[in-house]
Amino acid sequence: MEMNAKSADRNLLLELSGEIDHHGARNAMRELEMAIDAALPKKLVLDLSGVTFMDSSGIALILRAQQRMQLLDGSLMVCGVPQQARRVLDAAGIGRLVTIR
Amino acid sequence: MRTKATNEFSLEFPSRSSNEAFARSAAACFAAQMDPTLNELEDIKTAVSEAVTNAIVHAYPDTIGRVQLKGRVCAGNVLELTVRDYGRGIPDVDKARQPMFTTGGEERSGMGFTIMESFMDKLTVRSVPGRGTTVVMRKRLAPRVTSAK
């Protein structure tokens, strides 16, 4: 999995690409936290449009992002969710907890 | 009763996380002979990824052990996949299958079994503490209309 960060005016865009599974989860989690800590955003957008596969490791990643943004009193939006990842999120009912566009 | 398989495979690998991608790809390659839709292939890959990750994370938390993946094509266009480990076992399977329950720490969401259940038709989990866990997943693939040759 790769993560590309773009930050401007306390908006942080994180573009995720490749396969999100447990193998890369620890690094992904750390990268996510470092990017949030560096930008201290008011608004975080996770763009999953480059994700070719995602299992429940992606859910843990999104929930962590949500938790961090709540601590910062900011918001999280997940966008560009490919069909397979969408079905994983739907099976877990994540749409009830996180804004998905 | 065990149904007769028209084709099968079996492979074994060490519980290294780099084998998660290998296992789900292998299962998808085997399933390809059943002419699955893209959605069905993705379902299979996702369910195998969850089952194999469970074995790697929970069966062998501090060691590298063996994980077995088996696939069978059964009557009625049913794909049966078995993920077996010889690790720690699950003391309470019903509890482990509950959504959001995890002993895996912050990187895990506790949704693995929920996803396996929703992406496959049938999920059976057998576990003996200290001996290991066997997860059997079955999915009937939609028969496709093919033109006569």
Image (tube, grey):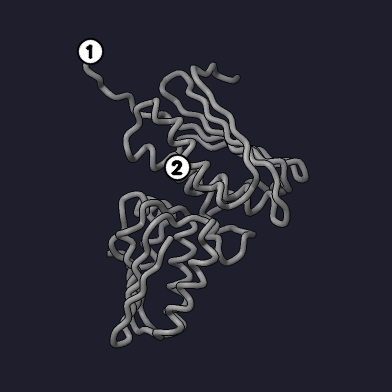
Q: Which quadrant of the structure image shows residue B4? A: top right
Residue B86 lies left or right of residue B135; in this view the side is: right
Quote the CA–CA distance across marks 1 and 2: 30 Å
In the rendered view, tell whether residue B134 sits above or below residue A82: above
Chain letter belonging to callout 2? B
Where is residue A91 shown, x and y percent of the image? 41, 51
Relative placement, left or right, of B13 versus B34 is right
The structure residue drawn at horizontal position 50% and vertical position 49%, both measured from the top left corner, is B114
Decide which of A17, B59 is in the foreground and name it. Answer: A17
Q: Residue at x 43, y 66 (%)?
A: A62
Q: What residue would you read off at disc 1?
A: B148
Residue A86 position within the rendered picture, expressed as x and y whole percent measured from the top left: 34, 54
Q: Which residue corresponds to the image point at 49% horizontal and 55% vertical from the top-left?
A: A21
In which quadrant of the rendered image does the N terminus of chain B lie? top right
Q: Relative to B136, is A53 above or below?
A: below
In this view, the residue farthest toward the right is B130
Which SS class for mark 2? helix
Residue type marked 1: Ala
Q: Which numbered tag is attached to residue B45?
A: 2
**Label 1: chain?**
B
Question: Mark 2 Cα within 10 Å, few/some/many (few <14, many 20+)?
Answer: many
Q: Mark 2 belongs to which amino acid?
A: Lys
Return the disc, 1 or 2, that comes first in the chain's sequence: 2
Q: Position of residue B139 (x, y in %)?
A: 45, 32
